[in-house]
Image (cartoon, grey):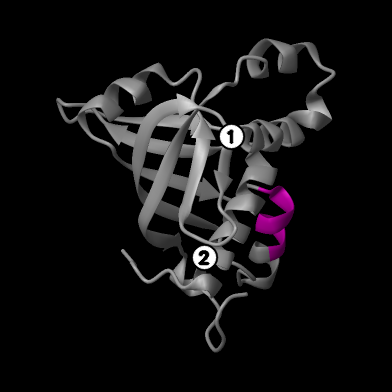
């Protein structure tokens, strides 16, 4: 686990998460029940701060995550680039040009009303599908968010396919 998140590293993390969310439209948040039972929740509305390791996500449907956070606010957010093009190019060349994913270790805050800026960000993200029936059914009630404070990260790596001589990005 790496706790050194300078501005350059944070930029790399943001890029990997953005690529992952474009490919799969979500990332996963792992939490643990008071009994020690793990759960993974898909979240499509994670937004990363431009300049600091903080972010937020809209929390509407995650009943199990909500229950777990009452007892333990620590979570792991995983974002993996599942793009077929990314993986095919990497497999053909035998090397990744960027990290294929990242795990973010974080403390998740209490549920609170979304700000006007947060509402603007989610509207912009869902705009391409706004016209669909499904969009109206699942994205029309977004009003509550949780802040996320990231304290460490770990890249998803496959050592034999990582660049040998230069750093990624």
Q: Which residue is mark 2?
A: 10
The quarter of the picture where residue 40 lies is top left
Q: Which mark is residue 54?
A: none
Part of the protein shown in magenta: 83-89
Left or right: where 66 falls relative to 58:
left
Q: Position of residue 39 (x, y in %)?
A: 33, 29
Which residue is drawn at the image coordinates 73% and 18% (left, top)? 135
Residue at 61 percent across and 69 percent down: it is: 96
Magenta segment, principal secondary structure? helix
Quarter occupied by the C terminus: bottom right
Helix, strand or loop for disc 2: helix
Residue 144: image location, x then y, percent? 51, 24
Query: Is 86 covered by the magenta stretch?
Result: yes
Q: Does residue 78 appear left or right of residue 19 in this picture?
A: left
Which residue is painted at 42% across and 37% down in the image?
29
Whether residue 69 is in magenta: the answer is no
The residue that appears at 69% across and 57% down in the rendered structure is: 86
Per the rendering, the mark at residue 45 is: 1
**Where residue 56 sits in the image (x, y, percent)?**
50, 40
Front-lying residue, 8 or 39? 8
Disc 1, SS: loop
Look at the picture and state if 165 lies above or below 23. Answer: below
Q: Nearer the viewer, residue 156 or 62?
A: 62
Is 79 left, or right, of 70 in this rendering? right
Corner quadrant of residue 31: top left
Along the viewing direction, whichever of 155 and 86 lies nearer the viewer: 155
Q: Is residue 82 above or below residue 97?
A: above
Which part of the image, by quadrant, shows the N terminus? Answer: bottom left
Pick whichever of labels 2 and 1 is earlier in the sequence: 2
- Viewer-proximal residue among 127 and 114: 114
């Amino acid at each position: 686990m790496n706790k050194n998140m300078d501005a350059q590293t944070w930029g790399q993390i943001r890029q990997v998460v953005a690529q992952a969310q474009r490919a799969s439209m979500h990332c996963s948040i792992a939490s643990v029940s008071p009994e020690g039972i793990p759960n993974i929740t898909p979240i499509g509305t994670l937004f990363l701060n431009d300049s600091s390791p903080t972010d937020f996500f809209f929390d509407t449907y995650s009943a199990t995550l909500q229950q777990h956070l009452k007892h333990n606010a620590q979570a792991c957010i995983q974002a993996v680039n599942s793009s077929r093009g990314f993986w095919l190019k990497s497999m053909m060349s035998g090397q990744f040009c960027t990290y294929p994913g990242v795990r973010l270790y974080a403390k998740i805050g209490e549920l609170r009303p979304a700000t006007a800026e947060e509402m603007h960000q989610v509207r912009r993200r869902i705009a391409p599908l706004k016209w669909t029936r499904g969009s109206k059914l699942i994205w029309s009630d977004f009003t509550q968010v949780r802040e996320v404070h990231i304290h460490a990260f770990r890249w998803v790596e496959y050592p034999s396919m990582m660049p040998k001589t230069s750093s990624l990005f």
